[in-house]
Image: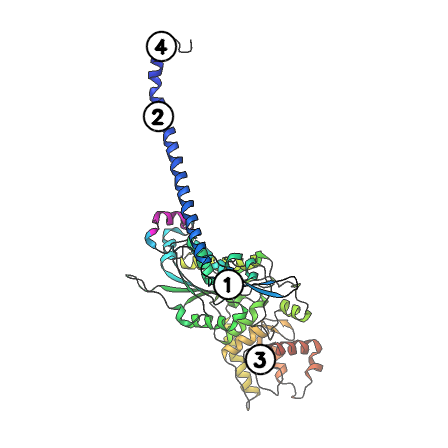
Amino acid sequence: MWYDGIRPLQALERSSERTKLTLMAVASSALTVMALMGYQTARRRARSDYIKTHINDNEGNPTHHAASQHINSLGMIETTAIHLPPPPPPFSDKANHDQTLIDEQLARNQAFLGKEGLDKVRGSHLVVVVGVGSVGSWAALMLARSGVQHLRLIDPSVLLGKDITSHAAASPSTLGRPKVTALQCMIAPIAPFVHIDTIMDEWQTRHLDPINEQGMEKKKVMVVDCLGNTSLDAKLKLITYCHSRRIDIVSALDPGNKVDPTRVQITDISDTFEDPSAKVIRRRLKQLGVDRHLPVACSIEKPVDPKIIKDQQYVESIQDGRLMPDIRTRHTPHFGSIAAMYGMSLTTYTLLHLADFSAYKLPALKLRDKLYGRIHQEVNKRERQHYPKDASPLTLTEVIYIYEEIWRGKSVVSGPQERITLARWDRTLPLSHLNTVCMSKEEARAHDVLPMDTDLREFYGDDVVDHVERQFAEQARFEDIWQ
């Protein structure tokens, strides 16, 4: 028989221990499932009650709305009111956050940066994001997700319908809200352990003051600059202020008219000649004394032809990086995904910088200080020799600017040369941004002994003279912008 001669009772006794264990496992599983279902049901009910309560409150509060514009069937704009959802309950009480849960949330960053590196990210800095639009909102969101303990968001604007394609916190329900508030409400349930300050205003120097906590020294400050061209003056002021105060800063250049994600990179401002949109900022910063040691997010892609723009002159100016008089007010069209990549790049650099991650370094600076010094001495010596009565020596800063920004280190006569110097173009006028050209040493010596009444167009040809005049005209436009 099936029990091979063993009585049924004896078989049952031998298997009783196994049966008990099986029954205990089944009972434990059932209790666990019941507990989880009960907990989830309770949370759903609590959340539902919370939403219903606030909906009722909002219905009785006619002031809790924002203006929304709609176009009716006649093509006219009508303004109606839309109700905004309430902000979520506060999540900033640190006592409510289990350190074990925080460690689990940041486990992957700790595996990459190490515990010491992650501790530096979390505790060592106040990170100030200036401008939380299509670039800054993604930078701020990822900084919070990555464990930055203190964020300060600065932006004076509100969310509009056009922001839905590019802003991290934009949705139909948040239109009309301040960008900083909408972003804070979005981050709160994701990273409740992050302390967020919001400032709905243009940035001021006082906004970069480090914060104090009891029992802690003043925290250092790192600035993430995401201001666009329409805030160009504020952007330059922010960069120069941080540079003069030795405040760490990383800046985003204009992502407009770019579509290639493989060309986005972080580099130094002195190495952004491949990005035409960087020209106006780089030139102005050099005049303000900031020519290096400013990491920026940029793209080395040549700007594409934006189809929405019908002005061919403007299209060509975008692609060539020429300066336009309305640079401060003109919006360049951009993809939200590319702008988000700029923000992610800024976040990556910021996290690695805060963590002192030694495996990552910016590309080496292409410094030519010895070359600039040599040219500076040669030019001033030649001025005193050939023009003793009206010698007009250049400063070292002016030499660097003219060599790099106007002529890119190339001779106007023969192109790239190893032995380059600067010389007056019109010998009857003094040296200046609008009368100094790059030439080889031999070309400069020959140029300096030409008769004063020499026809340069006849001597050098139309191509050379036209090129020189175009560059001088562009420099003149640039100087008009900043007057």
Q: Earlier in the sequence, mark 4 or mark 2?
A: 4
Q: Give residue 21's mark.
A: 2
Q: Earlier in the sequence, mark 3 or mark 1?
A: 1
Distance of mark 3 from mark 4, alpha carbons? 108 Å
Q: Give residue 66's mark.
A: 1
Looking at the image, residue 475 sits to the left or right of residue 310; the answer is left
Q: Is residue 360 visible?
A: no
Assign the N terminus to one quadrant of the image: top left
Residue at which label 4 appears: 7
- As drawn, the residue found furthest toward the front would be 60
- What's drawn in magenta, residue-wise? 96-110
Q: Can residue 390 be seen in this view?
A: yes
Looking at the image, residue 93 sits to the left or right of residue 259; the answer is left
- Check disc 2 and give the amino acid type: Leu
Distance of mark 1 from mark 4, alpha carbons? 83 Å
Secondary structure beneath dot 3 equals helix
Secondary structure beneath dot 1 equals strand
What residue appears at the point 62 percent right and 86 percent down from the top-left corner? 427
